[in-house]
Every structure is written in structure tokens, then in C-alpha cells.
Amino acid sequence: MIASLYIHVPFCAGACDYCDFYSVPVAPGDPRINRYIDTLLAEGEDRINRFSVERIPSVYIGGGTPSLLGASGMGRLLQGIAALWNEDPQEITVEANPESADEAFLEACGEGGVTRLSLGVQSFHEPSRRAVGRVGAVLHERLQLIAERFPQAFSVDLITGLPFQDTYRLQEDIEKALAYKPGHVSLYDLTVEPGTPLEMNSQLPDRDEADRLWIAGRDTLEQAGYQQYEVSNFALPGKRSRHNIRYWRMENWLGLGPAASGTLIDDETGTGRRFTNRADVDNYVASTYREIGGLVHEEPLDRHTLMEETFLMGFRYIEGPDRGLFKKRFRLGIEACIPATLAAWRNQGLVGPEPALTKGGLLFLDLFLQDTLIEIEKTFYL
């Protein structure tokens, strides 16, 4: 089996006001960190052996804030996971906050085989950053260091729709980010999740203004040569995220760590299995992996569920779901599954000759997917 590897590091210096991912605050030197790395490596060995994984094409170490592992922790993690494969992955990505990505950490990443960094910048505008619980005292200094050590081998995350943000501030954010020549930029439209502190923030732009901001940001990135290849992702030629493309194509991946999820697919039957770890870091580090059991929940994905998820993920991608892979799994072409939806959206110029949304169509992805799922339900369930 071929499967990518996602490794979750839930540790954070503090919670951002917009975040609803599972995370745990830690201070430098927290004794749980070393134990956590030990358990991750034990879980990785168990998963790879259990599912007979022969090749790992990509690795993504996300969070949380993986850079809080520090140079020694990240070095030990990278050295440990390198023992899990016979052939080096094509891509190893590590998420980092510039504030904690110091020179020693970057050196450990380079020596450990990391090919790509993903940096949570969000904004350079201090009032916007402070309004969502972010700080950036050394932001420019660290970005300069990262640009020198990983030239064009890093991605910058920016967010639109932040408090105190307008078109001028967003344009300034993008210009400052591009000055460091990242190979990739993720431009996210701020989502206010229920129950997060941001839900009560009165300084947020209204929905129409937030939409205008994102479109202005998209246009600026494209004018600078960054191609939109997914709803929120832009890249220079050859700099797309290989790992994330595997998600959008619904190809196999394993998830390690609390709250991590993995999906394995049987292309012959068009079905799959999803494995999700309990979101409990203290239990995770308190025992060995085999004692606590990492696979705390297994969910079968039947043919129709997997087909729906393939559409939900695949139409995020500028090229749409992989036609050959889709037909191999489901013994049907994409056009045969949702002919009415594709015809209606093509008539509006929002779907191209291939079954993929146009740049304009991606702005209405949620509506398109609603139509898609309704048609699938009528075709296969009624």
C-alpha cells in the first residue's frame, strides 16, 4: 500500500481566537513533549506495519504549532520517522509559527530532510493580529531567515476578513509576504466557528465586505504569478503542495497523534475506512501506544459515502476530481453520476469542458456541492 503520513502536534503557546482545532497550551521544556514524540514514533511504526505501507510519498507535520517542539524535539522526531520508510518521501512539510521558528529549529528541519515549511503569518497588521490573539514581534526577522534557508520552499498563510482589515491593509499584507518570495501562498477567508472567542468580536467586516476582500487578494496573487489551484491555495509553477493534493484526490493517508484522522481506500471495491484518534494528549503521553490503543474509532466508508467525499474534496481542486481514479474506484465516469448538475453549471459558465469548476465557479463551491449531493441522493438512493 502507498499512503501519506499526517503527524499532529497539538501543542500551542496559546489559543488563537479563530481556532477550533484540538490544541493544548505548553511552555518551553514541558516534559510531555519528549514523551509525546516517543508515542508518535511507536504509533507510526504500528500503523505502517499494520497496514503494510510500502511507500510514503509525502509527510505533513501539522498542528497546533510543531515548531514548539524546538530544535532538539523536531530533530528527534524527523530522525525517528526516517526509520519508518525505505524510500525518502517526495515532500516533507512542517508547519511553523515564525515566532518559534528560530535558526536552530530551521537547521534541525534542514538536516532532517524537510523540503517545505508552512508558515502561519495570517497578517502583518498588528491591530488585526492582536485582535485574534496573535503576536508578531520578530515576524520580519524570521521570515528573512526562512527565505534564506528555504528559498521558495515555503508557504505563507494569510487570512482575509480579519478585524480592522480593509483592501489597503490586505494589499499591504500580500506585498510584504511576496517580498520574501514564497513558492506558495494560502489565502483563507476567515471562518468564525461557533464557540470561539472571535464569535463575539464586533470589529469583523460584514460578509459582503469579507468576500470582496478575498477576491481582491486572489486577483493580486494571480497578477504576481501565483496560480490558484485550489479554493484557498496559490502557487508558483512547480510549487503546489503534493501532500494536500493527495487529500483532494482522496488518496490514502495515515494520521498520527491525538485528534488525527486517516483514511485508507480500497480502489477495487470503491470503499474505505477512516481511523480517528481520541483528542486526549494526556492519555496519549501517559502510556505506550499499544496500551492506550491509537485506533479508538473506526468508521467504514461505503461506496456512496466515498463517492460523495470524493466529490466534496475533488471539486475544491482546480482540475476537479481525478477522472481515471474515479472510474477505477466506482466503475462510473463523473459525468454519469451528476449529469444534470454539470450541465446546469456549464450553462452558467461555472464548469469547464472537463468536470471541474472554473475560477468563477470556485467562488460558489458550496452551492455546487449542494446540487451535487442532491443529485447523487436522487440517483443512488431513491
Image (cartoon, helix red, strand yellow):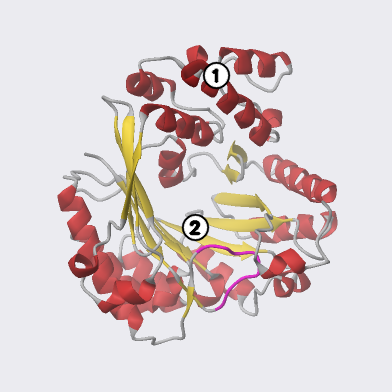
Where's the N terminus, which quadrant?
top left
Q: Quadrant of residue 283?
A: bottom left
Q: Quadrant of residue 326?
A: top left
Decide: few, some or many residues near mark 1? Use Cα within 10 Å; few <14, some 14-19, many ≥20.
few
Vertically, is 73 above or below 190? below
Decide: few, some or many residues near mark 2? Use Cα within 10 Å; few <14, some 14-19, many ≥20.
some
Secondary structure, mark 2, is loop
Q: Which residue is mark 2?
A: 151
| Kind of residue at disc 2 | Pro
Residue 180 location, x and y as percent?
60, 60
Viewer-nearest residue: 30 or 90: 30
Vertically, is 109 above or below 333? below
The disc at residue 378 is 1
Secondary structure character of the magenta stretch overall: loop
The magenta stretch spans residue 142: no
| Kind of residue at disc 1 | Lys
Residue 206 location, x and y as percent?
84, 53
Viewer-nearest residue: 341 or 106: 341
* Residue at image location 41% in from the left, 46% down from the top: 243
Magenta residues span 14-21
Going from N to C along the chain, the mark reached first, 2 or 1, is 2
Vertically, is 374 above or below 7? above
Q: Does residue 169 appear anywhere in the picture?
A: yes
Vertically, is 337 above or below 146? above
* Residue at image location 65% in from the left, 26% down from the top: 358
Residue 237 location, x and y as percent?
53, 39
The disc at residue 193 is none
